[in-house]
Amino acid sequence: MGKLRLGVNIDHVATLRQARYAATPESKNAEPDPVLAAAMAERAGAHGITAHLRSDRRHIQQRDIERLRAGIMTKLNFEMGNTPEILHIAIKSQPDEVCLVPEKRQEITTEGGLDVVAHRRELSPTIQRLHAVGIRVSLFIDPETEQVDAAAELGADMVELHTGRLANAFTEEIERQELSRLRACAQVAAELKLQVNAGHGINYQNIVLIHEIPHLTDLNIGHAIVSRAIFVGFENAVREMLELMQDYRG
Ligand code: PXP
């Protein structure tokens, strides 16, 4: 079993920049710079950088994606809603991977997984267009085996299992249920030869639970790392998370 890899989601570095510089994100004073955070994450040993270009551009801007593409040394995972505008940008920017997520304007962060079963028809041509230009495709899904099956049928390369419900479980009972759903989906996905990733709400405490999910390759973690970085610095925050990911047994 390979080791667990960390994709650092730098969206919230851009959230802070936009809080002050939404009108002038490219001005010389605009900070903090998500591209600098990406470089620091890589220096600390992160295996990839994740960024979500939302339709409303609330954090990451198109220019950030261009600069990330030009500057990062590991891999760029581009999170996106399935819209023609954003698909066009993805194809032009050539990230290594795309993770398709549902996107609602009102949500604070991505709330649920993609309903692959219900949206097969719209997802299929998008996956094909991304594959045609050599981009690997992940689908962010709730831990339901029907969703894993549908992802495999559509030819996705990977699934990212939504760990938000596990992260936010407020009883042991919910935690146990959710872990068992995640474990079952990881198993099914691995049997279907899908790469299994996980993300959403993972932090320095609940990461111990993630070790109980088999077959994982990438974890995408944002909010907890960016928050911790305020107190210990970006590189330290990434290093501490990497340390907690060691000894994953798959
Ligand atoms: N994975 C996906 C698909 C996401 O949408 C997000 C949130 O942007 C993350 C991972 C990271 O979640 P968090 O910020 O809670 O670590």
Image (tube, rainbow, N blue to C red):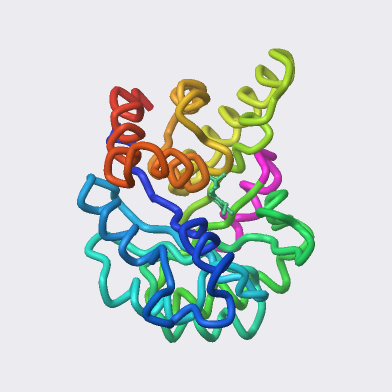
In front of the other: 113 or 103: 103
What residue appears at the point 65 percent right and 29 percent down from the top-left corner?
181
The quarter of the picture where residue 84 lies is bottom right
In front of the other: 1 or 237: 237
Report the residue that reaches farthest toward the top: 172
Q: Position of residue 152 (x, y in %)?
A: 57, 54
What residue appears at the point 76 percent right and 66 percent down from the top-left corner?
105
Whether the magenta-drawn stretch holds residue 185 is answered as: no
In front of the other: 123 or 22: 22
Q: Is residue 96 left or right of residue 202?
A: left
In front of the other: 187 or 232: 232
Q: Position of residue 197 (x, y in %)?
A: 47, 44
Query: Is residue 199 placed above or below 122 in the rendered structure?
Result: above
**Quarter of the rendering occupied by the C terminus:** top left
**Quarter of the rendering occupied by the N terminus:** top left
Instruction: Provide the residue span drawn in magenta.
Output: 142-156
Q: Is residue 2 left or right of residue 26?
A: left
